Image (cartoon, rainbow, N blue to C red):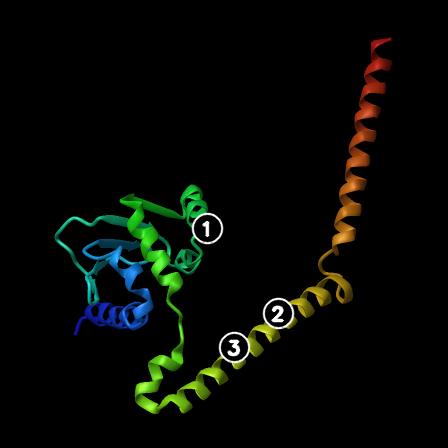
Amino acid sequence: MPIKPLVTAGIENVLNAFLYRAPALKTARQRLNGKVLRIVLKEFSTPLVLVFSERQLDVLGEWEGEADCSVITHMSVLPKLRDRQQMTALIRSGELEVEGDIQVVQNFVALSDQAEFDPAELMAPYIGDIAAEGISKTLRTGSAFLRKGLLRQQRYAAEVLTEEWRMAPGPLEVAWFAEETAAVERAVDALTKRLEKLEGK
């Protein structure tokens, strides 16, 4: 069984759950009604085509028709698209290429920005509201704990490398070295000029 239909179906279910469940997002969804957004990820050989309708979003692996907007980017750039202000910076830097009506991708980014990611909503129909909220809260606190621990370990490793093992210079040592290098450079320039004067006599 080909994996492509499974991937597109999974993406479609997730996007429909977050973008088409909440009635508050109806006005944002109406701006995309009837539009086709083609997303080309450079890591994959086939594009994803998002076809927006009034009731749902269809995710297709192949599309014969013309897309209203095509986006070409890397997978690592996708999380950055949640921030609408970064979009122009990404286009200028070349990380994001947009062909066609840019308003389509802007509306999609705005819609996904307004949608709230709450895993408890997805789990509630299967395990109940209270259990889903408990699991969701546990996952949030666990991820925050892991994030803090990772940052602490990064700080610790940086301090060990610069202070204890002296494998990397500290910021003050780098600044001192840069000043000393500049002073030696000035001294060499002055010596060169003096030698040129002496040779000229």
Q: Is residue 192 above or below residue 15?
A: above
Q: Are marks 1 and 2 in contact (CB under 8 Å)?
A: no
Residue at image position (31%, 48%) is 103
- Local SS, label 3: helix
Question: Which label was assigned to residue 151?
Answer: 2
First of labels 1, 3 by sequence position:
1
Q: Which mark is residue 143?
A: 3
Label number found at residue 21:
none
Pinpoint residue 132: horizontal percent, then vertical percent.
40, 87
Q: Quadrant of residue 165?
A: bottom right
Q: Which residue is mark 1?
A: 85
Q: Residues within 10 Å of mark 3 (few under 14, many from 20)?
A: few
| Residue lying at 83% horizontally and 24% vertically, measured from the top left | 190
Q: Of helix, strand and loop, which one carries label 2?
A: helix
Q: Residue furthest left?
A: 64
Mark closest to the chain's N terminus, 3 or 2: 3
Is 27 in front, or is 122? Answer: 27
Taking 115 as reference, is 177 left or right? right
Badge 2 amino acid: Leu
Q: Can you give x and y, in whole percent of width and height, for residue 172 in the image?
A: 78, 52
Give the percent coordinates (x, y) of residue 170: 75, 56
In the image, taking residue 174 as reference, residue 56 lies left or right, namely left
